[in-house]
Image: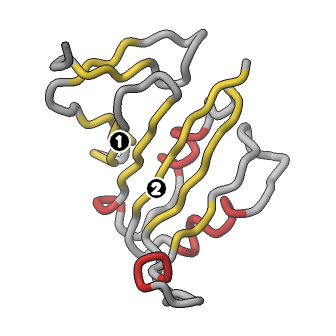
Amino acid sequence: MSRFAEVIVLARDAEDVMEPLTHPDAGREWHQCFTRVDDSVFTGAGTGSAECYLWVIQFTRHNWRGLLAHLEALPWPDPRSVQVLVHDEEDDCFGLWMIYDGRLTEVPLPRTARHLNPEVSVTGRLSRTDRD
């Protein structure tokens, strides 16, 4: 099944944790690689600083089921700073997951509703409830 999903990970001091996810690994349940986004994107400079708090990935298939569990299990240096934004193809907006009590948990967004459908989407469809 072909469908798109974009995932953004924000986390402080997580360069060492995220670095292995920027390279292929046949042992992972999902196979795409994250791309590091450093501060050169904002400054227009050719190279960024050593600090990076943002990684992005796009999935072109329905093959990222293990991603959220994998991210949850990582040894984050500052788990309270971890934010995972997920936008599946049919979502109206990005959903937000954060680590609470050691678990990656979806944060309810005002005026949205999640409709689970495992055959269609890994996370279900996130819809706005305030649209006409």
- Residue depicted at 47% across the width and 22% down the height: 90
Instruction: Give SS at disc 1.
Output: strand
| Mark with earlier residue (2, 1) | 2
Question: Could you tell me residue 77's position as x and y percent?
Answer: 42, 70
Question: Could you tell me residue 30's position as x and y percent?
Answer: 71, 40
Q: Which residue is mark 1?
A: 97
Q: Amino acid at mark 1?
A: Trp
Height in image: 78 above or below 34?
Answer: below
**Quadrant assignment for the N terminus:** top right
What is the spatial separation of the Cα atoms under label 2 and label 1, in whole angstroms?
Answer: 10 Å
Question: Could you tell me residue 112's position as x and y percent?
Answer: 23, 24
Quadrant in which residue 43 is drawn: bottom left
Q: Nearer the viewer, residue 18 or 57?
A: 57
Q: Is residue 59 left or right of residue 115?
A: right
The numbered disc on residue 9 is 2
Classify 10 Å Cα crowding around label 2: few (below 14), some (14-19), many (20 and above).
many
Question: Could you tell me residue 47's position as x and y percent?
Answer: 58, 89
Q: How many discs mark residues in the rendered view?
A: 2
